[in-house]
């Protein structure tokens, strides 16, 4: 395959650039047909660079107008210019100003990297290496410059002109044109550069910082969406306050703007003072946004804002250090949400995401360390491993050294590295220093890929009153890492006594045991607790204290005991989840052997008791009802997977829950309707109540009773918010209710003009678990509401089908794989980044049973064989097949 020839970039090869760029002056002139960019870079040799050393600037698809040094246009023989780079063979020895004129066609930029047009709005996306699509540059995160940007455009076409930093000048020009000049005093790498020019509506507000400075806030959206900004603005102000209170971090400019655009490759981008967002993470009102949309907005607004310190003020030395900003910022946004909402509920949600996204990555051909040591295409490393496992590492660090030392370490990091392009080593050193605990062994979490397995065995000696826990950890081999060393694993724990309370013990030996944390550092530990009055039920990895797979052969009665009594909410949920998983795995096995899955009545009793308990948070009860999904079961089975058998086992368990818990679930529904809706509030309490009712209806409908489906259809029509409406629609469609098709039509008639709601309509259809789904999905690709040019539409239809419809993606005739492969091949021409994401849905292809495995492999080979395949897709396919 062609890609074998692309040489990887290696961490070991890092060296600083020969030249520094102290200032960047950009003049951007927007016209309908083309945009010209005049960039003036103040270049200077770094210490140690010999005079006259060649200057190599990065480029990508650049059309060059002219090159000048200190105002004099260069004759063509003094430089080499190509779309992918510019070389000056012998630049001046003294600091000089290089002026580059480039000509861009933003409307033709379908990759959505660099400068592009989204629904008529000019905007940019420069991370990771998009700035080189605007002008030639030292496009690497360790080159920090002070930027000044002058934009000019037709006033009617683009009344709004936004850049990084503060606006220092603006005014009219002849011919209906106008201009604005933005200056950002904070030196930054090019990936944080941004501009926006267009006709947008805005909502403005102010924020007074802890030290009393007033910051002007603005959120810009396409016209027609001005009524959907309030929640994002509120989330922004709460984020700003939280970072002051939790970390002592204040905002550092006079202006903070957010722009929502409809065509965007990922969630959002933290450009200095000018965050640009996928509009999905800004726009909300109760009629169009679900509770999970609101939660997503709150989390992403916070995430991007928090980057101002963790990412912008302290940036990354190179892209191998990506987790330095992403893992840490995810950790920070998770903590923010925990403080805003419910901590246990947030933790359970995050662990579910980690297991559903990161575990399969870590256990498959795309596994890589949180800090990779080589890459062919950096855009393929914005992964669940870097983000979510990266956040887990920060969380473990906090567990290991304690809250106070952790905060001191963060303070030290902000203090010592402000203005730096830093490394993971720099970061971890701050915590070692603050805690006086050497963390060299802990660094393995950044270098070693794969999810550790921790096997646990327990014994109680009643005569000696000792309780032993034997731990054995193994880290599976991953690509390029056949052998692994033991990791530092913090195990938060409790020994639960028969009265349900945590027991005390006199002493512990065999490992470092501090308060309620055991620290494993070796492959094996035997921890002995002395003075233990009775045989405890162990509650291990409370709060999911490490991203590992614990294996303890617990008696089902221990797990139902923990479901009822554990003081740690996470482990109450985990106990239910583990019990359900055991049944589901055995159930899938039974189905394949032609038998019926067996359901443990003790589990159903404990679940019923929990869900009926009015003193528990409704959101928590809703999570208890969410048994492991089909993809989770497949991952647990690991090999020779038959998605149809899994689906049957899954359906059987859910129907059994629906039948056994009918009284409780019906009460949940009727209590809620008796209490009435009240005014809609998108807060955690309201969202939790809605989640519980919708989970109850979903399980009741799993029994297939027609009265339930009729009630759901009435609920669909009378819903006063999108959460309830789309939950009802999904039940109707997925359970083949008689009214399903008509409900889909009514939904489209009402919301067809709201693209973000069209996404829900597409996703509900793409995830229907029946054999007609593939044809429907294919038909939808030509529906007027659909477009492959828009990443959100593409992900809603094709991404949902490939990732959330396991039986239809992996149809035994291979047609599901074939369709996704065709889509990837088509999409690769337009938007390789989005295409590459979709290919990752093949990552677990080796765990299918032989027939499906062969079909998936053939689909992958077909993608690989496409002439001119992008580096993005090529890299994923190559690693997936390796
Ligand atoms: N840095 C962004 C974040 O995590 C994400 C990001 C990286 C991104 N590359 C991108 C967004 C490309 C859009 C397009 O907050
Ligand atoms: Zn981020």
Image: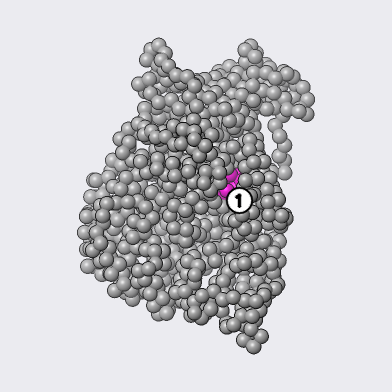
Residue found 51% across the figure and 52% down from its top: 335
Q: Secondary structure at mark 1?
A: helix
| Viewer can see residue 414 | yes
Locate residue 236, reporting x and y percent: 44, 41
Locate residue 588, reporting x and y percent: 45, 72
Q: Residues within 10 Å of mark 1 (few under 14, many from 20)?
A: some
Residue at mark 1: 407
- Give the residues drawn in magenta, as a range: 321-328
Count of numbered labels shown in the rendering: 1
Residue found 57% across the figure and 42% down from its top: 310
Magenta span has 620? Answer: no
Q: Is residue 342 above or below residue 248?
A: below
Q: Is residue 89 above or below residue 748?
A: above
- Which residue, as the protein is rendered here, is positioned at the far bottom? 463
Residue found 65% across the figure and 26% down from its top: 21
Dominant SS in magenta: helix
Q: Is residue 417 above or below residue 547?
A: above
Locate residue 581, reporting x and y percent: 47, 70
Q: Quadrant of the N terminus?
A: top right
Left or right: 653 as drawn, with respect to 69: left
Residue found 45% across the figure and 27% down from its top: 162
């Amino acid at each position: 395959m062609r890609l074998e020839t692309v040489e990887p970039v290696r961490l070991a090869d890092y060296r600083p650039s020969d030249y520094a760029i102290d200032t960047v002056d950009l003049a951007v002139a927007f016209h309908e047909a083309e945009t010209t960019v005049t960039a003036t870079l103040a270049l200077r040799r770094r210490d140690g660079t010999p005079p006259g050393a060649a200057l190599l600037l990065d480029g990508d698809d650049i059309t060059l107008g002219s090159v000048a040094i200190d105002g004099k246009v260069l004759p063509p023989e003094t430089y080499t210019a190509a779309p992918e780079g510019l070389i000056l063979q012998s630049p001046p020895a003294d600091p000089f100003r290089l002026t580059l004129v480039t000509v861009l066609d933003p409307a033709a930029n379908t990759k959505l990297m660099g400068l592009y047009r989204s629904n008529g709005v000019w905007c940019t996306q420069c991370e990771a290496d998009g700035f080189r699509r605007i002008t030639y540059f030292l496009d690497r995160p360790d080159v920090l410059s002070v930027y000044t940007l002058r934009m000019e455009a037709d006033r009617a076409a683009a009344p709004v002109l936004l850049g990084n930093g503060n606006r220092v000048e603006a005014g009219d020009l002849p011919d209906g044109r106008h201009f604005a000049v933005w200056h950002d005093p904070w030196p930054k790498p090019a990936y944080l550069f941004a501009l926006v020019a267009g006709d947008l509506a805005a909502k403005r507000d102010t924020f007074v910082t802890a030290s009393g400075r007033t910051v002007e806030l603005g959120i810009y959206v396409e016209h027609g969406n001005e009524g959907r900004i309030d929640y994002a603005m509120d989330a922004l102000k709460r984020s700003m306050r939280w970072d002051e209170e939790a970390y002592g971090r204040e905002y550092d400019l006079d202006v903070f703007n957010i722009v929502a655009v409809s065509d965007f490759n990922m969630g959002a981008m933290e450009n200095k003072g000018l965050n640009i967002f996928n509009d999905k993470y800004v726009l909300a009102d109760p009629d169009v946004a679900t509770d999970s949309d609101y939660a997503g907005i709150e989390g992403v607004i916070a995430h991007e804002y928090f980057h101002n310190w963790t990412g912008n003020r302290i940036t990354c030395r190179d892209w191998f250090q990506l987790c330095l900003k992403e893992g840490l910022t995810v950790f920070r946004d998770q903590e923010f949400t925990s403080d805003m909402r419910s901590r246990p509920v947030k933790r359970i949600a995050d662990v579910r995401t980690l297991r559903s996204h990161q575990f399969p990555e870590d256990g498959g051909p795309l596994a890589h360390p949180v800090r990779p040591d080589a890459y062919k295409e950096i855009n393929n490393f914005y992964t669940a491993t870097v983000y979510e496992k990266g956040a887990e590492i920060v969380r473990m660090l906090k567990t290991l050294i304690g809250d106070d030392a952790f905060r001191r370490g963060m303070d030290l990091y902000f203090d010592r590295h402000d203005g730096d392009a830093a490394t993971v080593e720099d970061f971890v050193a701050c915590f070692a220093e603050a805690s006086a605990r050497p963390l060299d062994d802990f660094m393995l979490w950044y270098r070693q890929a794969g999810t550790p397995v921790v096997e646990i065995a327990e014994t109680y000696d009643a005569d000696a009153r000792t309780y032993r826990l034997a731990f054995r950890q193994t880290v599976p081999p991953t690509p390029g890492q056949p052998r692994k060393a033991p990791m530092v694993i913090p195990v938060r724990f409790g020994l639960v006594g028969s009265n349900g309370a945590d027991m005390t013990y006199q002493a512990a030996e065999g490992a470092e045991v501090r308060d309620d944390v055991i620290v494993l550092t070796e492959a094996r530990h035997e921890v002995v607790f002395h003075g233990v009055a009775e045989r405890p039920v162990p509650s291990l990895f409370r709060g999911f204290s490490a991203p590992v797979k614990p294996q303890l052969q617990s008696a089902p009665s221990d797990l139902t005991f923990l479901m009822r009594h554990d003081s740690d909410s996470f482990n109450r949920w985990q106990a239910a989840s583990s019990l359900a998983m055991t049944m589901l795995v055995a159930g899938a096995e039974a189905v394949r052997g032609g038998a019926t899955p067996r359901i443990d009545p003790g589990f159903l009793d404990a679940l019923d008791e929990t869900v009926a308990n009015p003193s528990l948070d409704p959101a928590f009860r809703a999570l208890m009802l969410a048994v492991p999904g089909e993809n989770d079961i497949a991952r647990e089975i690991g090999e020779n997977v038959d998605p149809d058998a899994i689906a049957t086992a899954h359906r059987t368990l859910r129907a059994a829950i629906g039948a056994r818990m009918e009284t409780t679930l019906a009460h949940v529904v009727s209590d809620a309707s008796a209490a009435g809706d009240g005014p809609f509030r998108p807060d955690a309490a309201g969202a939790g109540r809605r989640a519980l009712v919708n989970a109850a209806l979903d399980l009741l409908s799993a029994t297939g009773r027609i009265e339930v489906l009729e009630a759901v259809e009435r609920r669909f029509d009378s819903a006063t918010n999108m959460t309830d409406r789309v939950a009802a629609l999904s039940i109707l469609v997925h359970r083949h209710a008689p009214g399903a098709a008509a409900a889909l039509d009514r939904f489209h008639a009402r919301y067809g003009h709201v693209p973000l709601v069209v996404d829900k309509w597409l996703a509900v259809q793409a995830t229907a678990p029946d054999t007609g789904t593939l044809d429907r999905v294919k038909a939808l690709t030509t529906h007027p509401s659909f477009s492959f040019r828009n990443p959100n539409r593409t992900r809603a239809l094709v991404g949902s089908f490939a990732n959330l419809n396991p039986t239809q993606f992996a149809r035994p005739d291979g047609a599901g794989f074939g369709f996704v492969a065709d889509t990837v091949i088509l999409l690769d021409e337009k938007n390789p980044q989005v295409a590459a994401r979709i290919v990752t849905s093949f990552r677990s292809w080796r765990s299918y049973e032989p027939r499906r495995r062969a079909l998936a492999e053939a689909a992958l080979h077909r993608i690989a064989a496409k002439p001119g395949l992008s580096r993005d897709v090529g890299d994923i396919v190559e690693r997936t097949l390796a």
